[in-house]
Image: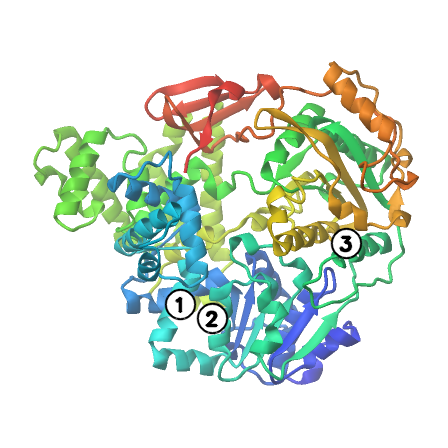
Amino acid sequence: MKPSSVNLDRLNPSQLKAVKHFKGPMLVLAGAGSGKTRVLTTRVAYLISQGISPSSILAVTFTNKAAGEMRSRVRTLLNEDPHGMWLGTFHALGARFLRQHGSLIGWTSQFSIYNTQDSVRLVKAISKSIGLDSSRWSPKALVHGISDLKSQLINPQEFLEEQSDSHDIFKRKIADIYPKYQSALKEQNAFDFDDLLVKPLEILRGNERLLDNYQSRFEFILVDEFQDTNKAQFEFLRLLAEKHKNLMVVGDDDQSIYGWRGADVKNILEFEQHFTDSQIVRLEQNYRSSGSILATANAVIQENTKRKGKTLYTEKPSGERITLMATPGEIDEARWIADRIEMFLMTGKESIASNIAVLYRTNAQARAFEEVFRRKGLPYQIIGGVRFYERREIQDVLGYLRLISNPRDQVAFERIVNYPRRGIGGKSLEYLKDWAQSNDTGLLDGAIEAENISGMPTRGAASLVEFGTLIQKYSSIAFSTPIGELLGLLVEELDIFSALGIEGPEGEDRANNVRELIAGAHDFRANWVPESDEFIEDGFSELDLFLQEVALIIDIDSHDVSTEKITLMTLHSAKGLEFPTVFISGLEEGLFPLHRAYNTIDELEEERRLFYVGITRAQDRLLLTRAGRRRRAGEIVHASASTFLKAIPKSLINRSGNLGSKPKLHLRSSTVRSAATEVRKNRVFGAGVTGNEDYVTEEQEFVEDQEFNQDLPRLVEGERVVHDKFGSGVVRSVSGFGKDLKVAVDFEGAGEKKLLARYAGLKKDY
C-alpha cells in the first residue's frame, strides 16, 4: 500500500507531525477535544501504508469502545482490516497474553476473571476461615488495599515481611490476607483485574526468550490515555519498547484523574526522563467546545502547578456564557436542574434528552436526581449503577458458564450450586467443603463423588451429583458448540424461565434480561474480529472469549448514545464523553473538592483536574450548581461555594435571570425559610467566592424534603443487599419517594420482606 492511500488532508499541522513521526519515542500532549483518536487511528493506518506489518503494531486503549472505534476507523482508512495487530485495553491484552502463557506460572488457559464482587466474596471467605471479623475488617477495604499493592508491583511475601513489625494494624491484616488470597486465586485458576496487568509483566521478566520474542515483534507501540497509567502498566510498556523504542504515548496531564486507583501522573510528566531523545507534540486546537466553555476550562486548570503546560483554543464562536446557580438544598438543586432541562427540551434548545448530562462528584448525589426526575417523568439513564452484567439473574447464568469453562472456579460453584433450587442445604455444602479440603480437590470434583462422602445427607448427595454431571456434560461440548447455542441449551435445561416466572412481574423482567443475554451471545459470533480466529487456533473456545469480553466491560462501555434519555453519571465516568449540554452539580467545599483533597497539594490538583474534565465534556452550554446545605450522616451540613469557582472570570458568567421564570413553590419549614432567606440576602453564588454582581441569582423559593438523606444507599432492582437480621437478599422492587421510599427484598433465609428504606439499614452485599 502506498503512502497516498491514507488521506492526511483533514489533519492540522500538529496532528500531521504526530502521525508522520516514524522512529523514536514521542509524547503527544492532546488537550480535550483536540482529535487524539483521529491522530492515533490515522497513525496506525499510515504506518501500515508505509509497509509496516499490522502484526508489528501494538495499540493500547483504556476502553473497549475506544478499541472498537479505532479498529473501525483504521479499517475505513485502509479499506481492509488490520489483521494481526494487537489492539485493546490493557486488561484485554493482558488476558490475551495470559491465555497463551499463563501456564508458565501455574494457571491453565481456561482461567476465570474475577470482578471486584468476586474478589470481595473470596476475601470474605478467607477472613471467615482465619477468624477475622468482617464487620470490623471490611472485605471491600481489604480488597482495595491488595489492589493498591498489586498496582505498585508489591508481591504478597514482600509485603508480609515488610509489615511484620508494623504499628499499622490494618496493614498487618492485609499482609495476613494477601498471600492467602493470591493462593486461593491460583487454586481456583482465576485472575483478578490487577493480575491481568501484573502477571504478564511477571512472566516476561522471568522468561528472557519470550520477552525477546515480544520485544522483536512489536516494532511500534501506541498508547492512549497515558496519563492514567499506573506503575505496572508503565513498566510493561517500557519493557516491551526497550528494543525498538518506537513508543508513542498520547495523553493529557490535565486530565489525570485516577490517582485514587493507582494511576501516577508522573508517568506523563516525567516521560522525557524515562525515554531520552523523545519528541513532544502539543495538540491545542479544540474541536468540541464553544469559546466560553474553553476559556472557563483554561482559567480553571491554570491554577494547577504540576502540569506540562498548554492552552487550548478553538475556532468556534464564544457561544453562551457559563450559568451559575445556588439553591437552598440538594432536592432544590435537583428540581432546578430538572426545570432547566424541561425548558431546554420544550423550547428546542435541545432536540433530544440524550444531548444532556448531569455530572456529580459522588454516586450518593444521584439519589436526589433520581427522585426528582421520576416525579417529573423525565427519562434518564445512570452510568455506574447496577450494570446489565452485574444483575443477579445475569450473574447466575454467567456463573454456570464460568464453571463450565473453569471447573476450579469455587466462587462460581457456590453461587449456582443451589440455583435454581435443587435442595442442597448448608449442611451438605459444609460436608462437601470439608471433603474437598481433606482430599485436596475442587468442589466440583467433590460434587461428583458426593454419594461417597461420609455423613452427607442423601438428598443433598443426589442433587450434588446431578449438578456435577450437568456441568461435566456442558464442559464436554463447550469447545465444539457456538456460545449462543450453548447458552440457549443450558438455560432451557435448567428451566430458568420457569424459576423466574414465579417471581411475578419482576421475574418476567429478569427473564427478558436472560433472553437479551442469549441474544448477545448469538451476536458475539456475528461481531467476530480476525484476532478471535487466532485464539480458536490456539485452543480457546468461544465460551472462553465470551466470558472474557463480558468480564472486561466497564461503566463507560454501557453508555448508550442512541437512547433518548438524560445521562446521570459521576465526573469520573464522564471521561472521554461529550454532550451539547452539561450540568455539574454539588460545587461545594467538602464535596467538590472533597474534604480529604486538602491533605496534599497533589490531591487538590487532581480534584481540580476532575473539574476540568467535567467542564470540557460540554459542547454548547455549561451550567454549574450548588446547594447551600445537604443532609449527610443524618445531619444538615451547610456548605460554601467551591474554591474552584474563584478562577472563573466574571466576564464568562451568565446571570441566572436569563434562564426563564422562577419556580413558584412553597416553603415547608422555618429551617428551609431561613436558608432561602440567606440565599436571597447574599444574592451571590457563594458568599466568599466573589463579592460582585456577576454572581447574582434569581430570588428563589423551594420546597425542601427534610427527610432526604443522600448518604442512604441507592437501592436498585437486581442488586444484592444485606440486613442485620435477615441476612443477604436481592432487591425486587423500589417504590415511593424520600422518607416514604419502600423496598421489597427477597432474603435467602427469610423470604421476601417489604421495608421502609430509611429504617431498614440495608447495605450493599458483595
Q: Amino acid at mark 3?
A: Val
Direction from residue 472 to residue 299 in the image, left or right: right
Question: Residue 65, percent across and down?
Answer: 58, 56
Q: Amino acid at mark 2?
A: Phe
Question: Residue 471, percent across and down?
Answer: 26, 45
Q: Nearer the viewer, mark 3 or mark 2?
A: 3
Alpha carbon distance from label 3 to label 2: 34 Å
Residue 346: image quadrant is top right
| Residues at marks 1 and 2 touching, judged by CB atoms closer than 8 Å | yes
- Residue 236's disc is 2
Q: Amino acid at mark 1?
A: Pro
Comes first in the chain, label 1 or label 2? 1
Q: Nearer the viewer, residue 394 or 476?
A: 394
- Residue with the mark numbered 3: 300
- Residue 200's disc is 1
Helix, strand or loop status at disc 2:
helix
Q: Is residue 500 above or below residue 291?
A: above
Task: Please indicate, yes or no, whether residue 424 appears anywhere in the rendered image.
Answer: no
- Residue 62's disc is none
Q: Is residue 71 above or below residue 758?
A: below
Residue 275: image quadrant is bottom right
